[in-house]
């Protein structure tokens, strides 16, 4: 599997570390209810198909990336810097 | 009074030459990491006469070179950073924190190819280009300084490992030569 880092170009998997669903970037507000925090911390969809995930380019530019990956085919559909991802500004 | 002895990162380890490929330590120079604050990128670039390196690039500046060193940062090598930069960026003096070596010779690329997943063909990595990537199991900075010469910067604390891994690859390439 290869990931095209927006800064470094295409690199192979060994340079990256998987973190989890990109949803982790979308913190609930301070006023959020316990239920919202519970959802944020524990509840994830587990789709067979495109998912948005956080990856860390630790052996490269040290950017956090949001990678859109098809969990059925492992096809990488999109890669963007986490700071630019929609989840980060949600 | 304590008498401190100056010792470079690869002292006692380099230079070595195997199969026509040479690995040597680059003479110590000032190294300063410069990381622009959010929104101050343009002002910082202006301080360097617009010569702030984009991702994967190096830029010569007065007295030294700026080497892109990862997301939103570059390493100034060869000259001290002006204190005025502190308005625009986090500036950290790191001269003693890194081991800097030069791998050169006709087979240097074959040696690197054994250690890094980076595409280092001429079409993908021209002279003057730089990358943060993996060298065997360690993150490094690799810059192509001429057709057959590559500067590798690794953590000083791992200088022995850096030299060992390169030496082993040099031996491997040499053993394959007919
Ligand atoms: Zn990267």
Image (cartoon, coloured by chain):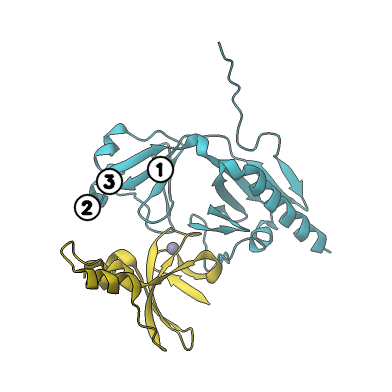
Chain colours: A yellow, B cyan
Same chain assignment for discs 1 and 3: yes
Q: Disc 1 designates what residue? A: B33
State if disc 2 and disc 1 touch (CB < 8 Å).
no
Q: Disc 2 designates what residue? A: B39
Mark 1 neighbour class, 10 Å CA radius: few under 14, some 14 to 19, many 20 or more:
many
Q: Nearer the viewer, mark 3 or mark 2?
A: 2
Query: Is the residue B108 above or below the residue A72 in the image?
Result: above
1 or 3: tag closer to the N-terminus: 1
Which quadrant is the C terminus of chain B positioned in?
Answer: bottom right
Query: Is the residue A73 above or below the residue B95 in the image?
Result: below
For residue B44, the mark is 3
Report the chain holding disc 3. Answer: B
3 or 2: tag closer to the N-terminus: 2
Q: Residue furthest top?
A: B1
Task: Tell me which image quadrant ligand 1 sits in.
Answer: bottom left
> Could you say where residue B19 lies in the image, as x and y percent from the top left?
78, 53
Q: Quadrant of residue A24?
A: bottom left
Residue in front for this viewpoint, B150 or A36: A36
Q: Secondary structure at mark 1?
A: strand
| Residue at 77%, 59% in the rendered image | B172
> Could you say where residue B107 lies in the image, as x and y percent from the top left?
70, 58
Q: Nearer the viewer, mark 1 or mark 3?
A: 1
Mark 3 neighbour class, 10 Å CA radius: few under 14, some 14 to 19, many 20 or more:
many
| Residue at 22%, 52% in the rendered image | B39
């Amino acid at each position: 599997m290869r990931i095209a880092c927006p800064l470094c170009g295409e690199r192979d998997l060994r340079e990256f570390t998987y973190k989890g669903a990109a949803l982790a970037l979308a913190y609930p507000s301070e006023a959020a209810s316990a239920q919202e925090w519970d959802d944020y911390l524990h509840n994830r969809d587990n789709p067979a198909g495109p998912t948005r995930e956080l990856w860390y380019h630790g052996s490269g530019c040290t950017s956090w990336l949001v990678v859109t990956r098809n969990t059925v085919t492992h096809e990488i559909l999109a890669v963007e810097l986490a700071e630019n991802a929609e989840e980060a500004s949600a | 009074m304590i008498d401190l002895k100056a010792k470079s990162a690869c002292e006692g380890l380099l230079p070595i030459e195997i199969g026509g490929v040479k690995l040597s330590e680059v003479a110590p120079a000032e190294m300063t990491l410069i990381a622009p604050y959010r929104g101050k990128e343009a002002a910082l670039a202006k301080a360097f006469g617009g010569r702030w390196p984009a991702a994967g690039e190096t830029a010569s500046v007065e007295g030294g070179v700026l080497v892109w060193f990862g997301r939103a940062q570059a390493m100034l090598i060869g000259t001290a950073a002006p204190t005025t930069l502190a308005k625009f960026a986090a500036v950290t003096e790191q001269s003693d924190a890194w081991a800097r070596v030069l791998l050169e010779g006709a087979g240097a690329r074959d040696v690197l190819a054994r250690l890094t997943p980076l595409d280092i063909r001429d079409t993908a990595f021209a002279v003057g280009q730089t990358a943060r990537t993996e060298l065997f199991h360690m993150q490094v900075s690799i810059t192509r300084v001429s057709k057959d010469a590559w500067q590798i910067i690794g953590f000083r604390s791992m200088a022995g490992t850096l030299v060992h891994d390169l030496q082993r690859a040099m031996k491997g390439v040499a053993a394959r030569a007919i």
